[in-house]
Image (cartoon, rainbow, N blue to C red):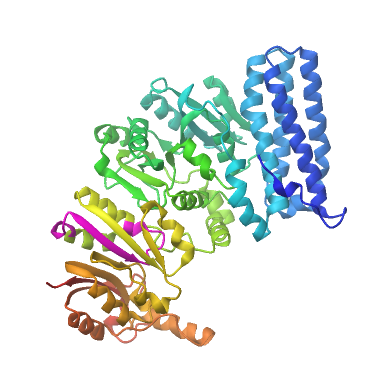
Amino acid sequence: MTHKFLTLDTASADDPLNFWKRVIQNQRFLLHIATKLLPTLPYQENRLLISQIKILKSLTTDLESALSNPAVQNITFSFQAMHHNVDDTIDRLTSLILIDNREKAAALTEYQLIPFLREWLEDTYFWTLIYPDKEKMKEYYETEFAENHKNTYSNRGEKYLISIMIPVYNKLEYTKRCLDSLFRNTDLAKYPCELILLNDGSTDGTEEYFESLGITKVINLKENVKTMIFSLLFRVCEGKYAAFVNNDTILTEHWLDNLLTCLQLYPNAIMSVPSTPNTSNRQGMLAELTPENAEAAAKAHNRPCPYLWEERCRLMPVIALYDVDKVNTIGFADRYFHTMEFWDDDFSLRARRAGFHQILCLDTWCYHYGSISGKADQIQNRTLFNGRLLFQSKYGIDPWGNNYCYDSFQLSNIELTIPQQSTEVSTLVIDPGFGADVLQFKTQLRRLEKKSLFSFLINDSDLKGDLNPFNSTVIVSPSILETHKRIPEGIYNYISLGRDLSVYPDYKELITECSTQLKPGGFLYFYVANPYAYHLKQELTEERMLNGKASLTLINIQELLLLITKLNLKPQLKAILDTTSPKEEKGGYTEHLDQYFLMCEKQG
C-alpha cells in the first residue's frame, strides 16, 4: 500500500492534518504487528502471543482519542465503526489463544483482523488526507487507488479457482434461501471453490447461523460499514475468479459454469453476470420468473450459448463473476460511494475506460428479489439520490445520462435493416455517450454474422475513454459548431446521431455531410425534438429567461424532410408520444408528441 500524502509536510505543527497523520502511522504499526503475528501463530508460546495481542489492544485503545475528533462527526467515514470492529476482533483473538485454538486464531487473523486493519487505514487516509481536495483526489485515483485495493495473494488460483463472496446485513430468511440454493446448484468441489461469508453487523441471528455452517472464511463485523464490505471480501479471495452474490438472490443450476465459460472464452472480459428479474439496466428476461418457479425454469434454460451474450457499458452485479487479475488493475469498490449506491456504476465506468468488456449472459437465469436489504435506506436516507450526486461530483457527468442504457425502440427499428447490408458493416457514431446503443447494435451484428467496424466523432472529450472497449478511431470535435467539419473519411453503412438533432446548430450542414458518406442502401438515423411539444416550449422559455438563449435549435419537421429528400435520402418518420401529458392542454394533438425518430435510407 502506498500513501504518498502521508509524508507531505504541512505549514504548521498544529495543522489538523498532523493529528490524522499520527493516527495513520499508529494504524500502520498495528497492521505491521498483526502481519508479523500471523506466521507465528502455529508454534509461538501462548504467553508470547498474548503479549503481542496486548500490544495490539493497547495501540487500539490509544486510538480512542480520535473518536472525539470533530472530523469523525463531520466526514462520512467509518472510523468509529472500524475501531469497534478491530477492538472486538482482538478480543475474539485473545479468547481463541487462551483456549489454544490456533487454527481458528490464524483464520481470524488472516481473514478478518489484517483486512480490517488495511481497510481502516485506507479509510482514514482517504477521508482525512485526500478528500475533498479535487487535485489530491485526482492524483490518488490515478496513482494509488488500484494499488491500495489490490488482492495481494500471490498464489491465487492454486488452491481455489473461484472464490464465492456473499455479504449479509440482516434478512436471515433470505440468506438461508440463498445459501440453500447455492448448495443445491453449485458443485463447490468441481473447480474447486471457496465460500466467503460476511456479516455486516447483523442483529437477527446471522452470526450464529454462519457459525453453524462450519465455513473457514466468515467475516463478522460488530458494526455496519456499508461500502467497505466489498473491499473486505475482495482482499481475502484466493481464487483466480471471484463470484459476488447478493443474499436476496436464488442461484440456479449451471449458474457458475455458464458465467465461467463466458469469462474464459471472452479474453478481455472483466465480469459476467446472469439475467435476473427486478434488476435495472435491462438485465431481466421475458419469462415470468418467480421465487417458486425460478430453479425449475432455469434448469430447462441454463445452457452455455454465446449467441445470447451481450456486451454492456454498465452492469448491476446482483450476481457477478469477476476476473481478479483484471480487477486488480483498476481496483474494486470505491469507498467514496459511501451510500452503497452507484459504486457499481463507478466500477463499470472504470472498467470500460480501461478497455475491458462487461458481459450480460442471457443464457443464464437466476432470481433477484430486489433491494431487500437496501430498500429502507433508499427511502429513509435518499441513498440513490445522494449516490448519483457523488458520481456527478467525481466525474462531472450524470450516470443516468449519456446513453447509459440502450434504446430498445431505436434498436428494434434498425435491426430490421441489418440483413440487407453487406457482410462487413461500417458504422459512424456521432456523440454515442457511454456507448450503450452501439454495444447493443454490435451484438445484433454479431448475431447476424456480420463483421462490424466502428468510427466515432464526439463533442465531449470527457467521454472519449468510455469508447475504449471498441478499440476504434475516436475523433474529438473542438466545438459542437464544427461537428459537420470533423466527420472522419469513409463510406458507411450506418451513421447514427447519439444526441437529438436539435442540439446541433449546424444540423443542416451535418445532415448534408453525413449523406455524402453513406453507401447506397445505408441508413442515417437520429431523434429530433418536436418543436411544438408543450414541455419543450416551457423549458426553452425558462432557459431563455435564465440564460438569454436556448440550448436547442427548433427544427421545422416539414423543412427537415424536404432537405432529407433533396439529399437523395428516403425518410421514415415515427412519432414518439410524450409519456406525461401537460396539466393544461393547449394547441391540440401535436403538443403531446415528444420527439420524432427518423431513419433515412440512401438511394442508389
Quarter occupied by residue 419: bottom left
| Whether residue 292 is situated above or below residue 460 in the rendered picture | above
Q: Where is residue 410 in the image (x, y as percent from the top left)?
A: 27, 63
Q: Give the side of residue 381 with respect to residue 176, left or right.
A: right
Looking at the picture, how far across and down is residue 275, in whole percent? 34, 43
In the picture, the quarter occupied by the C terminus is: bottom left
* Foreground pick, 59 / 447: 447
Observer able to see residue 523: yes
Kindly indicate the quadrant of the structure image that contains residue 390: bottom right
| Quadrant where the image shows the N terminus | top right
What span is colored magenta in the figure? Answer: 418-438
Residue 580, given in percent of the width and then of the height, sits at 36, 72
Query: Which residue is pictured at 48% across the width and 44% down the height?
Result: 372
Residue, far front:
489
485 is within the stretch colored magenta: no
Furthest residue in direction right, as rendered: 13
Q: Is any atom of residue 336 visible in this view?
A: no
* x then y, percent, for residue 433: 41, 63
Q: How many labels does the image show?
A: 0
The answer to whether residue 446 is left or right of residue 470 is: left
Q: Does the magenta stretch include residue 437?
A: yes
Point 44% across, 83% down: residue = 540
In this rendered view, identify the residue nearer to me: 10 or 63.
10
Residue name at image x 33 percent, y 59 percent:
437
